[in-house]
Amino acid sequence: MNKISYPLIGDYGVPAQYLLSHIFKDQIVVPPPITSKTIELGVKYSPDFVCTPFKYTLGTMIESADKGANILIQLGGGCRYGYYAELQEKILHDLGYDVKVINLITKGKPELKRILGSFKNINVKFRKSKLVYYGFITMKMLQYMDKVDDYIRANIAFEVEKGSFDLLRDEMLEKFKETKGFTNLYKIYKYYFKQIKKVEVHKPDNPLKIGVIGELYTLMEPFANGYLEKDLANNNIEIKRFTTATYLLLKKKKIMKRAFRKNKVIKYHLGADGADNVMNTKWLCNHGYDGIIHIKSAFCTPEIGAMPIISKIAGEKDVPVLFLTFDANTSEIGVKTRLEAFYDMLEMRKNK
Amino acid sequence: MNKVGIPRGIFYYYYKDIWTNFFDALDVPYIISPKTNKKIMKLGVKHSNDEMCLSMKVYMGHLFYLKDKCDYLLVPRIDNFKCNNQTCTNFLALYDIVSNVVDNPILNYNIDLEKNKNLKKGLYDIGFKLGKSKKEIKKAYKYALKEYKDRRKAGIKKNIKNLESEKIKILIVSHPYNTYDEMIGADIIKYLESNDIKLIYSDKFSSKEVNKLSLKYSKDIYFKYNKDNIGALKYSEDKIDGVIFLSSFPCGPDSIANELVMRKINLPYLNLIVDDSSGFAGMETRLESFIDMLGERHE
């Protein structure tokens, strides 16, 4: 009997687990949450200058394999993310694990044929109809999650009773795990979104607003960015983030097409999310945001390419940008000092 | 008057024969930046992002060297060569980076075979932009392409002939913009050649032949130039004594593709990573012991 597992990105483990447990009858191994042990493992067995998500996901894979998983599902993106799977499989084999790593997306393009074929390989009893039905539910679940998160991000800094948002959100995710169908899912979402909106917030008239942009893994996995968003919230700052699973899977193509038609800054795609971040910088500058924080994992090539362009745009519009690079052993304290200085500077500019 | 500046970095090593012959035939004056030296390197480090790869820093150095010496800068963009032959994301972003950091007018073309944009269309556009007639451009393009193909064929022939040599043979797996750059690979090549070793270069193989061979090492790979490199390694596997992987720090595609191959080959190999602060002395020791080891095996 196969045991299936997957690497973690933020809370998106919930929909992933939901989908996999419904389309396969096999056992699902829920990967343990990322800790410093995970990263240690990842760093130890990774090549030197591969980007950090490789190390994180490899660490999680090793931990899942220790728990008995023998099929690991890896997503993939437009840059070298799409090529992780093969090397990770080889590394795991060399370590003596008998596992199979399945890559869903290569070259940034999900090929339906490839995905179906690899699912068939996992289990011969796999049926397409099930994937379609539960796939749509999972998609909806992702959308609901991101909608709730968007609202929370804008308001969490000003909640009167600390922690009330997180409590409700965790409860909602717990309920999402046992969703029975479309209507059930909608009801859960509707109920909790109402509750979340009822949470008392004390928002000042003109709070500091910061947009967070950058590379997708570091943005979406809070452990990888040293709980940056929490830190922002603790300093009473409203947060805006574009990159979510919904954006990457559903909206990206359409939005980028429209954005390219009427911009004069860049002519071509920069690879992965580089162009998106350039466009988002422009949006943030035009919508009165006080500052921008650009975060990425070390050696992320597309973002390095986008950085000079981002700083040029923001420089023209006179919006400060803080560039942060997170590696597997970035010290939290060092980042905190830089963030604090950044907040102070923004505060001073605002009061001037 | 319409002087074109060609930075001696990245794209130059792939397209130099086409560009120079094309501009010669069109009677357009051009200037190529000199071989990379310490001054250019310094300029590059100053004007680029700290985390860019060394090859990019070198390119930026050449760019800023040429900035005031020409009217146009030639910066192409290469996206893909059809099905699963993508390039590194630096190749995609370079035009936009340059156009944002430099004010000079830029001659640009885009190679994106999936969207049907190829070299021919690109060079025609450049010709028109320089005020030449269609007839002139056609003639120049034909001439440039023929020269390029002849030279390339001769290079490949010589490279493959070297595979039959009796001496110790080492395959250099690297990108041409690293191998032949004065500050990145030149010292290593010189040192090896002075030690009486036959060098075979992974970029001098026929791409048509070699590209498919890469699948024997890696199923998923989709980087065109790494595919060619790995295929070249597969092609010459039985005929060489050792492999040297040479990459600039921190090269994205190399970091994964080379690591995968290193875990799969049965040959002695040396993995050299060149940084803007690494001196040759450290390299020399490693090269020396590698050569000694190969020498003993060869006998």
Image (tube, rainbow, N blue to C red):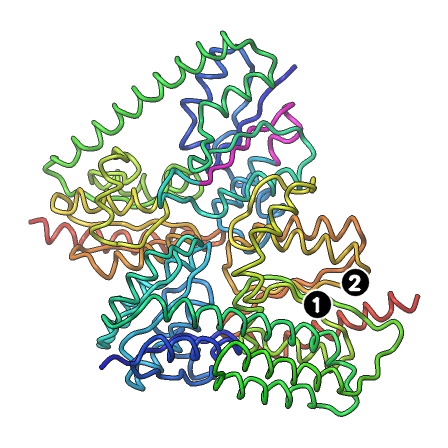
**In the displayed structure, would residue B95 be above or below residue B28?**
below
Quarter assignment of residue B162: top left
Residue farthest toward the left in the current orientation of the protein:
B299
Separation of residues labelled 1 and 2 (CA atoms): 9 Å
Query: Which of A169 and A54 lies nearest the eye of the viewer?
Result: A169
Lateral position of residue A212 relative to residue A351, left or right: left
| Crowdedness near tag 1: few (<14), some (14–19) or many (≥20) residues, C-alpha within 10 Å | some
The quarter of the image holding the N terminus of chain B is: top right
**In the displayed structure, would residue B105 be above or below residue B231?**
above
Name the chain under label 2. Answer: A
Query: Which of A108 and B50 lies nearest the eye of the viewer?
Result: A108
B69 in the magenta segment: yes
Query: What residue is disc 1 on?
Result: A240
Q: Position of residue B298 (x, y in %)?
A: 9, 49
Please report contact status of discs 1 and 2: CB closer than 8 Å, yes or no: yes
Residue B187 shows up from this direction: no
The secondary element bearing badge 2 is classed as loop
x 51%, y 29%: residue: B34
Q: Which residues are magenta?
A: B64-79
Quarter assignment of residue A148: bottom right
Query: What residue is disc 2 on?
Result: A289
Q: Position of residue A317 (x, y in %)?
A: 80, 51
x 46%, y 17%: residue: B22
Q: Position of residue A99 (x, y in %)?
A: 25, 74
